[in-house]
Amino acid sequence: MKIFRKSLLISTAFFLSTALFSCSEDTHIESSSPEDVKISPQSITFEWQNVYMDKLAEFKNSADFSADIKTGSRFDLFDITGDKTPELIISPNNNGQTPCRIYSCNNGELVELGETGNRGTFLYLPDMQLIKDEYRGNGFIIGKYISYQNGAFNTVLSYSDNSMSASSGAAISYEINGEEVFLPDYDSALEPYNTQATINAGRKYTFGENALNYAVKCSESWGAVLSPKQKELFRAKLTEFLNPLDAVYAFELCDLNSDEIPELIISNGNSPENYCEIYYFAEDELAHIDGTFGAEGQFTFDTEQFVLSSGSTRWSINNSNFSANEYKHSESLAEIGRKYLLNDSNITLALN
């Protein structure tokens, strides 16, 4: 599997004029921020923040919590009810049949919505506002599409397929909503869903202190932090990438250099060969960091040490003495790049 792709098309003039990006296996990024931006993301408050932080602390102190950085507990903030307020999604671990636990906030109170998914994650279809809950076993698939309506989750369509058991002599069957159907009807029923772009939800953040703080106190606040000029620049750049025939692009705003001003990350897909591009504010203009970052359209970001990583490759954000060989990740990691599918409504949502 290809885990990293990058470009080294950096001219000497670009380096000297911006002092922003130099890349081997060690990269140092220092970007200036517009002087007129004074709002800290942590000064923006929402009623769900303390509620979710309390729940995360409670879970971290429970017997279900696992500190393993790869396979252990993680969480996510993601709007799956369509009210423009994120739900809290807790992933206890990434074992085969482990579901996510989903919570919402209503009038300052935590509300448990239920469990869904497996391996501590699930797919979400933003354009249809549906959860895809699918399990692949030994020779079979069972799954369902779930919507949130009237305060509860409801199954819109369920399906099963054991065709992968054919070699063992099993009788092949395809089912839609519990009824056996022929393969053409099975494919026809699933086609509207299979053509939808998806976002992987559940395991975005680890439980390190910095990751908890960034997720709850900063990640949903960038629209209020950006100035009108900055929003205009971000919107113009995102619009350049809009393509109604290609729905796999996604984007995210994230502060990658600890100046409380977000960079714009654009992801060109979610396959192994896909990568991210990064844009930052240089005075009153939007500039591009030469190079490509990550794999599967995202990269891991150490929110404590401000280091990007993909596979065995590391980039420093604001440490001129950074050594990739000496880097040891903190307990505060986030998967960055695919928070929003790239479309008009999500551009407006992210920049509001």
Image (cartoon, helix red, strand yellow):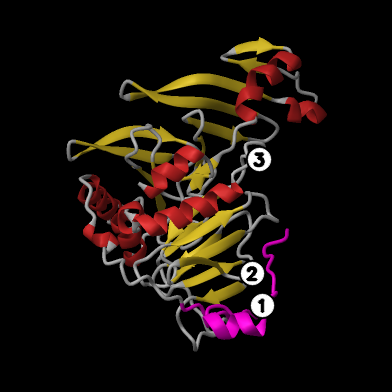
Give neighbour class at mark 2: few <14, some 14-19, many 20+ (Cα, 10 Å).
some
| C-alpha distance separating marks 2 and 3 | 22 Å
| C-alpha distance separating marks 1 and 3 | 29 Å
Give neighbour class at mark 1: few <14, some 14-19, many 20+ (Cα, 10 Å).
some
* Residue beneath disc 2: 291
**Element type at marker 3?**
loop
* Residue beneath disc 1: 10
Main SS class of the magenta portion in the image: loop
Q: Earlier in the sequence, mark 1 or mark 2?
A: 1
Q: Which quadrant holds residue 13?
A: bottom right
Give neighbour class at mark 3: few <14, some 14-19, many 20+ (Cα, 10 Å).
few
Amino acid at the residue labelled 1: Ile
Amino acid at the residue labelled 2: Gly
Q: Earlier in the sequence, mark 1 or mark 3?
A: 1
* Residue 166 position in % (x across, y down): 79, 26
Q: Residue at x 52, y 55 (%)?
A: 337
Q: Which quadrant holds residue 152?
A: top left
Amino acid at the residue labelled 3: Asp
Q: Is residue 118 above or below residue 147?
A: below
Provide the residue span drawn in magenta.
1-30
Numbered circle sitting on residue 246: 3
Q: Is residue 91 one of those drawn in magenta?
A: no
Q: Residue at x 40, y 43 (%)?
A: 349
Q: Residue at x 73, y 58 (%)?
A: 1
Which one is closest to the eye, mark 1 or mark 2? 1
